[in-house]
Image: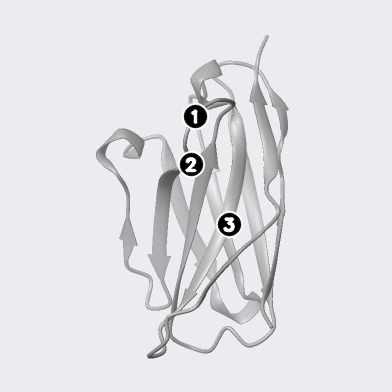
Amino acid sequence: QVQLAESGGGLVQPGGSLRLSCVASGSIFSSNVMGWYRQAPGKQREWVASISSGGDTAYPDSMKGRFTISRDNAKNTVYLQMSSLTPEDTAVYYCKVTILTRERPSYWGQGTQVTVSS
């Protein structure tokens, strides 16, 4: 079984920065894609960024420029560096891993709250 544990959320002022971390434990195998999603109150969960085990990254256009995803394969950890935060970035941020086997199972973390407010 795979477990994901996010950390690094909290309260930050507008214009500030924050780095989220997500540690994966269990059998995530060497070929996988890890990603970050977020869900604001009353809104659907939206994709923020993804990174493959080879280091290839992808972002929706709306997230490019302020968010940077990275990973440390030796630590089974993925990071999300966020900058120039606005109140619209307030959400619960979730980590997800998709194992690139035939079945392509996916696993989610419990989420970490990010609140941008003065």
Residue 26 location, x and y as percent?
A: 69, 84
Within 10 Å of disc 1 (Cα), the crowding (few <14, some 14-19, many 20+) is few
Q: Which of the 4 image quadrants contains residue 92? A: top right
**In the figure, is residue 104 to the left or right of 10?**
left
**In the figure, is residue 55 to the left or right of 10?**
left
State if disc 1 and disc 2 touch (CB < 8 Å): yes
Q: Mark 3 is on which residue type?
A: Cys
Q: Is residue 16 above or below residue 60?
A: above
Within 10 Å of disc 3 (Cα), the crowding (few <14, some 14-19, many 20+) is many
SS for dot 3 = strand
> In the image shown, does 83 or 3 lie closer to the viewer?
3
Give whichever of discs 1 and 3 has the lower sequence position: 1
The residue sitting at 50% across, 48% down in the picture is: 37
| Mark 2 and mark 1: Cα distance apart in space | 7 Å
SS for dot 1 = loop
Q: Residue furthest top?
A: 118
- Residue occupied by mark 2: 45
> In the image shown, does 16 or 35 lie closer to the viewer?
35
The residue sitting at 46% across, 54% down in the picture is: 69
> In the image shown, does 34 or 67 lie closer to the viewer?
34
Residue 32 location, x and y as percent?
A: 45, 78
Q: Mark 1 is on which residue type?
A: Lys
| Mark 1 and mark 3: Cα distance apart in space | 17 Å
Give the colouring mode of the picture: one colour
- Residue occupied by mark 1: 43
- Residue occupied by mark 3: 95
